[in-house]
Amino acid sequence: MPPSPLLPSRLKTQQLLLMAALDEHRSVLRASQSLHMTQPDASKLLHQLETTLGVPLFVRHARGVEPTEYGEILARHARTAIAELVHAQDEVAALRSGLAGHVAIGTEATSATTLVPRAVALLKQRFPQVSVSIDLAFSETLLQRLQSGSLDIAIARIQNVQERAELNYEKLEAAQHAIVVRARHPLAAKHGLGLRDLVTQTWVVPPEGNVMRSALTLLFHEQHLPFPKQVVETSALPVTIRLLQLSDMVAPLPVQVVRPYCGAGGLKLLPIGLDLQLGPAGVVTRRDRTLSPGALAMLGALRDVAGLMRGRAPSER
């Protein structure tokens, strides 16, 4: 069998970085700037890679570039390879100078205000040299980033956990949700409200395909109600909070997330039962990936804080 044109000796690290940057920026100019190289050098690297593989990786057009099917495959693997190289560097550094390195975690909204800050504080208390980056997004996005290698750990919800054998999943406590409005909303002082009273309101909701959006749609369906026609779609919690504060819109939010904004923050929870049945979030890692020492320390801190929140004593680490 002839040697593969993608033998490591022929595939340059700079080409991997360029593939990932082109896929992210969809522009040779912006990709080259992000890598601190000239545009002609970036174009030359891409041409060399396409020549080596014998397939087009990106289609050029007036607005920039778009990956071909070949380009999408290579870009995905390039991101994974880059992440593994970074992890290898972190592990070497950790062995040389004691526990250090970097850990990238992603979290959904509820854990972002409860579990994660406390766990990061505990990690920094134990291992000050470990640096941490925190990404806030919806569960679907977090799982994609975990799979691509850009995250070490995700705190996310997984539908049909039994079908995701490639992932480790440690269940956390389920979060309660409520319908939130501004304190001076016309419905804020009313009693005996039901979901039916909110059908004509303007809702701030996650985009279609999101777990909470699907659960909310199902809840309206189960109560034989039409889904609200007036909606503002956003995945950004700060935008949602500000829209509620400035208007008569309503939004479904985790109680733990919104509680700090009640009272002085001008928001209020409506007395309407909201059983979205989202299931609990969990701490998620990849089975096929060995965590760096820093990521293992972060995982330990998450477990200890989760245990404290359940009333258990922390482990010795």
Image (cartoon, rainbow, N blue to C red):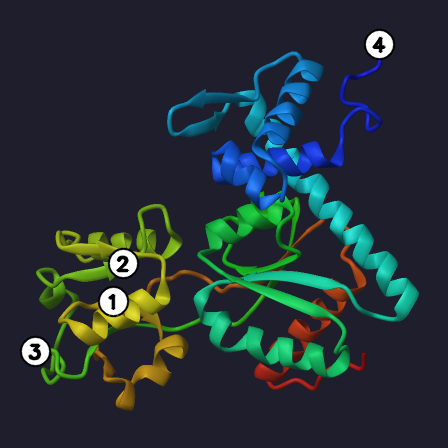
Between discs 1 and 4, the one toward the N terminus: 4
Discs 2, 4 touching: Cβ within 8 Å: no
* Amino acid at dot 2: Val
Q: Secondary structure at mark 3?
A: loop
> In the figure, is residue 124 to the left or right of 174?
right
Q: Secondary structure at mark 4?
A: loop
* Amino acid at dot 1: Ala
Q: Secondary structure at mark 2?
A: strand
Between discs 3 and 1, the one toward the N terminus: 3
* Amino acid at dot 4: Pro
For disc 2, the marked residue is 205
Residue 203, relative to residue 74: is it above or below?
below
> In the figure, is residue 96 to the left or right of 197?
right
Which residue is at 22% across, 72% downward? 244
Kindly report which numbered mark, 3 or 4, lies closer to the viewer in this rendering.
4
* Amino acid at dot 3: Pro
Number of numbered labels in the structure image: 4
Residue density around tag 1, few if under 14, some if 14–19, many if 20 or more, within 10 Å: many
For disc 1, the marked residue is 251
